[in-house]
């Protein structure tokens, strides 16, 4: 059951704008065929190996929930928490046949290469944070970095072009 809950949390990270998405996962050697269909802003129907679950996505806006309104409040001089700048979402780049693409949704944590840099197979190109873990994105072959399409703090989706190698 714990594996299923972790799996469902992963599905929460996916962008379910399309009506039906199908996935095939292997967890600890066991294969799971999964179909996800969004039913409402916070409800999804998930089929795992033929068994159907209705899942409420925590943190998703409830249907017809009133939106909070921010208003300035006069307060005694309180220290404000430091904010970390987040890079705005960049327009999606199609890349090329030689593009290294995002394997899962996440945020760019480190960019280790720049355009014109020579890389060897297995070199770390960048580091993504996904599901509270740092994931190294490696060069699949020797080459030269033609372009870097992402920047620190940028959010990416599966299939987004990250780096072009030539």
Image: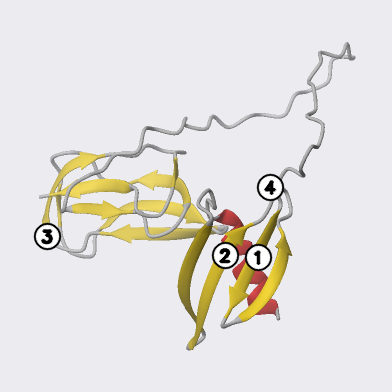
Residue at which label 1 appears: 45
Locate residue 20, reporting x and y percent. Answer: 52, 60
Local SS, label 1: strand
Local SS, label 3: loop
Instruction: Identify the residue at image location x=43%, y=52%.
Output: 128
Distance from label 1 to label 4 (Cα)?
12 Å
Locate residue 63, reporting x and y percent. Answer: 76, 42
Instruction: Identify the residue at image location x=63%, y=29%.
Output: 83
Q: Residues within 10 Å of mark 1 (few under 14, many from 20)?
A: some
Decide which of tag 2 and tag 1 comes sooner along the chain: 2
Decide which of tag 2 and tag 3 comes sooner along the chain: 2
Q: Residues within 10 Å of mark 4 (few under 14, many from 20)?
A: some
Q: Residues within 10 Å of mark 3 (few under 14, many from 20)?
A: some
Whether label 2 touches label 4, CB < 8 Å: no
Whether label 2 touches label 1, CB < 8 Å: yes
Distance from label 3 to label 4 (Cα)?
44 Å
Distance from label 1 to label 3 (Cα)?
43 Å
Q: Residues within 10 Å of mark 2 (few under 14, many from 20)?
A: many
Distance from label 2 to label 4 (Cα)?
13 Å
Residue at which label 3 appears: 142
Whether label 2 touches label 3, CB < 8 Å: no
The residue lying toward the viewer, choosing from 101 and 46, is: 46
Residue at which label 4 appears: 41
Horizontal arrangement in the rendering, residue 114 relative to residue 133 (left or right): left
Local SS, label 4: loop
Residue at which label 2 appears: 36
Instruction: Identify the residue at image location x=51%, y=56%.
Output: 130
The residue lying toward the viewer, choosing from 18 and 143, is: 18
Decide which of tag 2 and tag 4 comes sooner along the chain: 2
């Amino acid at each position: 059951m714990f594996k299923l809950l972790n799996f469902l949390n992963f599905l929460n990270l996916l962008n379910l704008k399309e009506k039906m998405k199908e996935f095939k996962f292997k967890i600890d050697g066991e294969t799971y065929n999964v179909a996800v269909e969004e039913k409402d802003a916070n409800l999804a129907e998930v089929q795992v190996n033929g068994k159907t679950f209705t899942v409420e996505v925590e943190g998703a806006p409830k249907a017809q929930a009133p939106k909070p309104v921010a208003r300035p409040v006069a307060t005694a001089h309180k220290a404000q928490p430091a904010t970390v700048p987040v890079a705005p979402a960049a327009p999606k780049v199609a890349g090329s046949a030689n593009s290294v693409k995002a394997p899962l949704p996440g945020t760019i944590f480190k960019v280790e290469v720049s355009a014109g840099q020579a890389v060897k197979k297995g070199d770390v190109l960048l580091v993504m944070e996904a599901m509270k873990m740092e994931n190294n994105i490696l060069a699949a072959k020797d080459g030269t970095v033609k372009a870097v399409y992402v920047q620190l703090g940028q959010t990416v989706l599966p299939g987004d072009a990250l780096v072009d190698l030539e």
